[in-house]
Amino acid sequence: MSIVKQEDGRWFADVEPVKGKRFRRRFKTKAEAVRFEAMVRERLAQNPDWNLKPKDKRRLSKLVARWALLHGHALADGENRRKLLVQLVADLGDPVAIIFSAHHYTEYRAQQLAGGANGKTLNNRPGYLRAVFNELLQQGEIDYPNPLIRVKPLKLQERELTYLNDEQITTLFETIRTRCKTPHVHMVALICLATGSRWSEAQGLVPQRVRNGAVTFVNTKSKRARSIPISAELEQQLNAHFTAHGLFSNCLNSFDKTLKASGLVLPAGQSSHVLRHTFASHFIMNGGNILTLQKILGHTSLAMTMRYAHLSPDHLQDAVRLGPVTGVEIAMAASA
C-alpha cells in the first residue's frame, strides 16, 4: 500500500490489502487518501468478496442510448421519444449523469421560457427524462436517485378544447368534397368523426377490421386494441371505398391543407384532432356517459376524459339549484 503526493498536488492512494485485490484513487488531501485506505481494509475484512464499484462517469447521452436499447424500442413512439431525448440532452449540454441535478433542468427551463418556448412542451420534457432514470434504476443500470423526482411542472392555464358545431362540420366536409383531390381524406375524416379515433388509428384500418357493425383499431397510443360500433351505412361506405381505392394512404397533409382552405379557425396545434374532440363533445352534450366515452376514446386515465364533462347537459346544475342567488331572486320577486 502506498499514498504518494503527485506533481499536480493531488494524493494518490494505491491499496492492495490482499493479493489480487487492488484499489486506486486520487484525492485532494492526504487525509482523504488515508481514510480511503482504512475504509477499503475494513470493508474487505467484513466481506472478503467486497469490491469497490468504480464511479459512474457516463453522460446523459449514454443513458438515453442505454434506455433506448433496453426499453425505448418497445414503446409505440419509441423512436420519436429517443430523438426528442437526444435533442434535450444536447440542449442541456450533455452533463455527466451522476452529477446532473434538478436545478440543471429548472435553469434550462427558465431560459427556454424567456425565449418564448411552449410551457406544455417544457412540462413534458422532464417527464421523458425522468422516465429514463426510473427505468434504468429499476433495471439496475444506475444506483443513484432520480435527480428529477422533485421537479414540479409549471402551472399553466388550461386551454378550452375546440370542437366543431353542425354548421362547421358541414363546411369542412363540403370543402373536402370539392377541394381535396386525395380520395382517402373524406373517409378517414368520417371515421374519426364517427368513432372519436385518432387520425393515425383511422388511417391504419384495413378491410379485415371492418365487420359485424364495428371497426377495430390496433397500434393505438395505449397499445390496446379497441372495437367501436359504427352504423350499417358507414360500414357499407368503408367496404365500397376499400374496393374502389384500396388501403388508406398517409393523407394527413392533404387534410391539413383542406382544413386551411375551409376557412375554419382552430387554436395552434389542433388539426385532425379537432375531429376527435368534436365526437367527444357532441357525445357528452347529447347525454352520453363519461365512462363509456373513456372506453370509446381509449383513455387509460379517466382524468383525460373528464375534460369533456363540463359539456354535459346537467353538469354542475346544482350550482344553480342550490346556490344562494336563487333564494335572493325569489325573495325580491315576492316583495315586489
Image: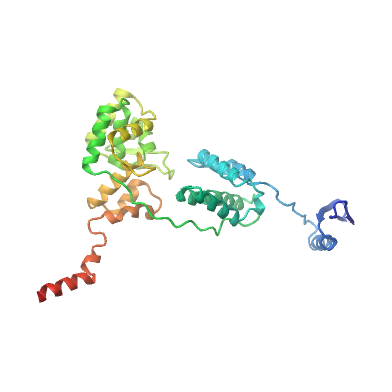
Please tell me which residue is depicted at 35% across the width and 44% down the height of the picture. Answer: 267
Check the image and name the residue furthest to the top: 244
Q: Is residue 231 visible?
A: no
Q: Nearer the viewer, residue 59 or 66?
A: 59
Q: Is residue 48 above or below residue 334?
A: above
Nearest the eye: 205 or 318: 318
Q: Residue 119: where, in percent of width, then height?
A: 46, 51
User: Image quadrant for the C terminus?
Assistant: bottom left
User: Which quadrant is the N terminus positioned in?
Assistant: bottom right
The percent position of residue 73, horizontal first and vertical second, equals 54, 40
Residue 330: % across, % down: 14, 72
Q: Position of residue 30 (x, y in %)?
A: 85, 61
- Residue 212 to residue 316: above or below: above
Q: Can residue 173 be seen at all in this image of the molecule? A: yes
The quarter holding residue 101 reads bottom right
- Left/right of residue 307 with respect to residue 336 in the rendered view: right
Residue at screen point 78% across, 60% down: 47
Q: Residue shown at 29%/23% (left/top)?
A: 244
Residue that sits furthest to the bottom in the current view: 335
